[in-house]
Image (tube, rainbow, N blue to C red):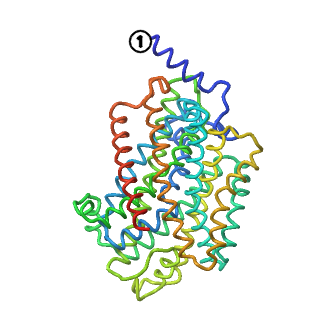
Amino acid sequence: MAKNSNEEKHHIISSTDGANKSLDEINGSVSVPQNAGVFKTFLAYLGPGVLISVGYMDPGNWITSISGGAQFKYRLLSVVLISSLIAMLLQAMAARLGIVTGRDLAQLTREKTSKFGGIVLFIITELAIMATDVAEIIGSAIALELLFGFPLIVGIIITIFDVLLLMLLMKLGFRKIEAIVATLVAVILFVFLYEVILAQPNMPEVLKGFAPGKDLIQNKSMLYIGLGIVGATVMPHNLYLGSSISQTRNFDRNDHKSIRSAIRYTVTDSNMQLTVAFVVNCLLLILGAALFFGINSDLGRFVDLYNALGDSKIVGAIASPVLSTLFAVALLSSGQSSTITGTLSGQIIMEGFIRLKMPMWAQRLVTRLVSVLPVLAFAIYYHGNEAKIENLLTFSQVFLSIALPFAMIPLILFTSSKKIMGEFANRPWVKVCAWIAAVVLVILNVWLIITTVSAL
């Protein structure tokens, strides 16, 4: 027994020796107090969960959630709940992987595959990053158009310079990035909380919506929207991000007690912030149900939602320009916060899969341009037809559904391996739950892809 324990300890220590660190400039950059109280120690670990949570409430979630509420009232709240629980499970595993091994998911996947396999997985994952960025870029550009009147193409070009903001923030320290993203998340939360309070939803019906019903399976339209919510919630890039930024805290990696403590605090932080994301997604769906259920109105675009919130014929007496403006502010906050985390994820994937060596500013600029240029080309081609441009959101969610298993399955395999994780490998119940979630998500996403393609 002692021998196995020593082997496990040796493995965990040696896994970080002589290796390229994930996000090297911020890896281990945040100090953790020694022998401090629980509250003070937790404050030191508080932050990475915020960056993780924004991916679960980015603009790609908005249309699906609000449309789900508008069409089926509160009945899809159960899907939001289940999706959030799955997200918590996967992100806890991603954090554990990074803390224990000193590697991120991209690095480990590359190490455990052939050169050809690594290239294939890199291409799939890079396309997933591009698909994720589509929603953020379009959301931010439309918010700039709604708030300041910028043409959509100009708004998309402006998002290229988000990378300069991230570079500046990295110079100031990772805690500054966490604080700014937390502020943007707070804006989103309070805007939608305020709008839901004004909408006065039926609370007994809201609570009933968290219980899954048979009609979710029987009603094909409801199942389709439900699958869209799942596909928009659990995104592959967040698993890579979580496995990397969990390593930003500087603790004793040679001590199993310190490792266990880091896992506990990091997972607590992640679950807290994902609970906030769960609340935001619930608010989006409740807002759609309270204001738009039973109303024959096209709510398939951000502009439609913006206009509807200011139209008394649709939302009644609470309609006002202030409500519409707050919606646009929240959309911009969502797009900007998601852009920051998306750019970091792109860097993690480039470094991990292809071990790209170039200056950090160039690496981030390349990552950003790879995502922005296809959207810009599409916007120029369909200039003046914003409906077509927003349709990219649907296709991006479909591709994310395809890419998800390529991140989820390696994550489960690695964190369940005693050889890789030692004594910190997944417990049997975690392993069972993770594989059930993976199989169910893969089946549902395949169904979503088939139905989407057949509807074209």
Q: In terms of depth relative to the viewer, which is nearer, 442 or 282?
A: 442
Q: What residue is drawn where x is 49% and y is 35%?
A: 96
Percent x, y for residue 381?
64, 73
Q: In the visual, does 274 lie left or right of 78?
A: right
Q: Which residue is mark 1?
A: 1
Percent x, y for residue 59?
52, 64
- In the rendered image, the residue lying farthest to the left is 214
Percent x, y for residue 22?
63, 37
* Few, some or many residues within 10 Å of mark 1 (<14, 14–19, 20+): few
Q: In terms of depth relative to the viewer, which is nearer, 172 or 10?
A: 10
| Quadrant in the picture for the N terminus | top left
Total numbered badges shown on the rendered structure: 1
Q: Amino acid at mark 1?
A: Met
Q: In the visual, does 84 lie left or right of 129?
A: left
Q: In the rendered view, tell whether residue 246 sits above or below residue 361.
A: above
Q: What residue is drawn where x is 68% and y is 52%?
A: 367
Q: In the rendered view, tell whether residue 297 sits above or below residue 207.
A: below
Q: What residue is drawn where x is 70% and y is 49%?
A: 170
| Quadrant in the picture for the C terminus | bottom left
> Callout 1: helix, strand or loop?
loop
- In the rendered image, the residue lying farthest to the bottom is 313
Q: What residue is drawn where x is 43% and y is 48%?
A: 87
Q: In the rendered view, tell whether residue 265 sits above or below residue 145.
A: above
Percent x, y for residue 358?
76, 43
Name the image quarter holding residue 219: bottom left
